[in-house]
Amino acid sequence: MVPATALTSLTLSLYARSATGVTTFIRNHQDALNANGVTVFNTIQVNPSGRLYNLRWNISPLDTVMVDSTKAHERHIGLWEYVWLNGRGKHEIVITIRNLSVVI
């Protein structure tokens, strides 16, 4: 884990890809270094279940909007790109969004 003070850049791209290959960006290389709902800590944090982390992303409702409302669910892919003094890296995540067509 890289502490916040060691990072020079952190961006987040969040997108969905259709069955025909069309990519729709929800976030496109958005600054995420302690910005836009993302907090990077300098020390390891522990959540109540004991999981360790040093990055927290508060996912917004706009991050979970269905791009294709005809689907029962779709995948939103998050690509984290980070740079620090001695290198750079990427990390990809997948979030499955479920279409709640009826909310009670």
Image (tube, rainbow, N blue to C red):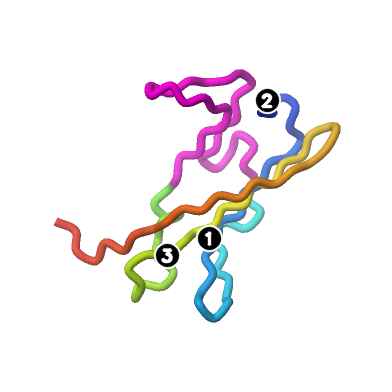
The percent position of residue 66, horizontal first and vertical second, equals: 40, 65
Q: Nearer the viewer, mark 1 or mark 2?
A: 2
- x 68%, y 41%: residue: 10
Q: Within the magenta stretch, is there residue 96?
A: no
User: Sequence order check: which comes first, mark 1 or mark 3?
Assistant: 1
Which residue in the rendered view is the most extreme toward the right?
86
User: Sequence order check: which comes first, mark 1 or mark 2?
Assistant: 2
- Given the image, on which type of amino acid does mark 2 rest? Pro
Asked if 73 appears above or below 59 in the picture, the reply is: below
The percent position of residue 33, horizontal first and vertical second, equals: 64, 37
- Given the image, on which type of amino acid does mark 3 rest? Glu
- Which residue in the structure is indicated by mark 1? 26
Label number found at residue 50: none
User: Sequence order check: which comes first, mark 3 or mark 2?
Assistant: 2
- x 52%, y 65%: residue: 16
Q: Nearer the viewer, mark 3 or mark 2?
A: 3
| Helix, strand or loop for disc 1 | strand
The percent position of residue 58, horizontal first and vertical second, equals: 46, 40
Q: Residues within 10 Å of mark 1 (few under 14, many from 20)?
A: many
Instruction: Give the residues in magenta.
Output: 31-59
Which residue in the rendered view is the most extreme toward the left?
104
- x 40%, y 61%: residue: 65
Q: How crowded is mark 2: few (under 14 residues within 10 Å), some or many (20 or more)?
A: some
Q: How many numbered discs sit on the rendered protein? A: 3
- Given the image, on which type of amino acid does mark 1 rest? Ile
- Which residue in the structure is indicated by mark 3? 74
- Which residue in the structure is indicated by mark 2? 3
